[in-house]
Amino acid sequence: MRRWTSRLSPALGVILLLLVWWAVARSGLVRPILLPPPADAWDALVQGIADGGLTQDCLVTLQRTVAAFLIAAVIAIPVGILLGANVAVYRSMEVVIDFFRSTPASAMFPLFLVVFGIGDGTKIAVGAFGAALVILFNVAYGVMNARRTRVLAARVMGASRRRVLVDVYFWESLPQTVVGLRNGVSLALVIVVVAEMFIGSADGLGHRLIEAQMMFEMPGMYATIFTAGMLGYGMNCIFLFAEQRWLHWGGK
């Protein structure tokens, strides 16, 4: 009984949300045109998958998100290790990093439009920019919190600075790096979807979402929101699985 309870407990929140949604929709507190019942949103979701439109938009958004995330990771991880290994340099750059990390990515849209123009390049670039700052911050602090005994031991045994960076700092910071990657991919998805909504786009979940809202196709809008949420949840679960499977040694 306990085993089944533990397996079903994650679904309780979903069931509760659907019940509240259904009750509010049936009560008339919100106009049906603004909040259709869950069954209508489900029908729109099934229809979107059946005709291929929703699936195609989801794949486009996923491609842009993965591209932005990979660019961010390739840049932010080595830079974060280098900055974290030299605390004085990081402190000198900390204000700049925190400033841009705290700046809403949407405020950077005009700048990226001027540089990259209207197209996929802008959406990917602004997503990579936001994700890179989050990843860099976590990597740098993971390096700065590395065990000094292991660093000193490597230096005593004659390891070069490059070997210390690669064989000690990288592995010591890896658990914190994965946290940064998990947050970074979620942020990249958010930025890409928002960019698809407001930067001339003919496809993607953001475009589909804003189009449904403008046409008052509320079931389709909720179906798109659900799809975007499941996409972000799925990517987050991949990193959680990897962390539990391969980084169980973190903190030991």
Image (cartoon, grey):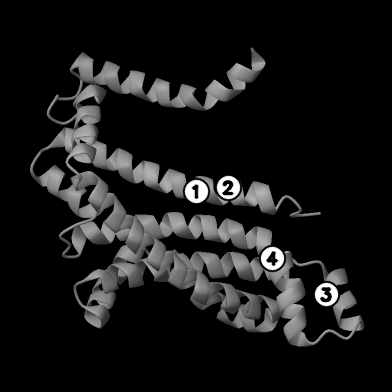
Tell me where residue 74 appears, x and y as whole percent: 51, 74
- In-front residue for pair 17/166: 166
Viewed as shown, does residue 145 lie left or right of 130?
right
- Please, what secondary structure does the residue beneath circle 1 have? helix
Distance of mark 1 from mark 4, alpha carbons? Answer: 19 Å
Tell me where residue 151 appears, x and y as whole percent: 83, 75
Residue behind mark 3: 151
> Of callouts 1 and 4, which one flags the residue occurring earlier in the amino acid sequence?
4
Q: Residue at x 46, y 25 (%)?
A: 13
**Hey, what amino acid is under mark 2?**
Leu
Tell me where residue 79 appears, x and y as whole percent: 57, 79
Please determine whether, in this image, residue 234 is positioned above or below residue 172.
Answer: above
Distance of mark 2 from mark 1, alpha carbons? Answer: 6 Å
Residue behind mark 1: 236
Q: Residue at x 16, y 65 (%)?
A: 200
Viewed as shown, does residue 163 lie left or right of 138?
right
Q: Which of the two marks, 3 or 1, is nearer to us in this view?
A: 1
Residue behind mark 4: 173
> Of callouts 4 and 2, which one flags the residue occurring earlier in the amino acid sequence?
4
Q: Are marks 2 and 1 in contact (CB under 8 Å)?
A: yes
**Hey, what amino acid is under mark 3?**
Val
- Which quadrant is home to the C terminus? bottom right
Please determine whether, in this image, residue 226 is positioned above or below residue 243.
Answer: above
Residue behind mark 2: 240
**Hey, what amino acid is under mark 1?**
Asn
Q: Which residue is situated farthest in the top direction here?
A: 1
Crowdedness of circle 1 by 10 Å Cα count: few (<14), some, many (20+)?
Answer: some
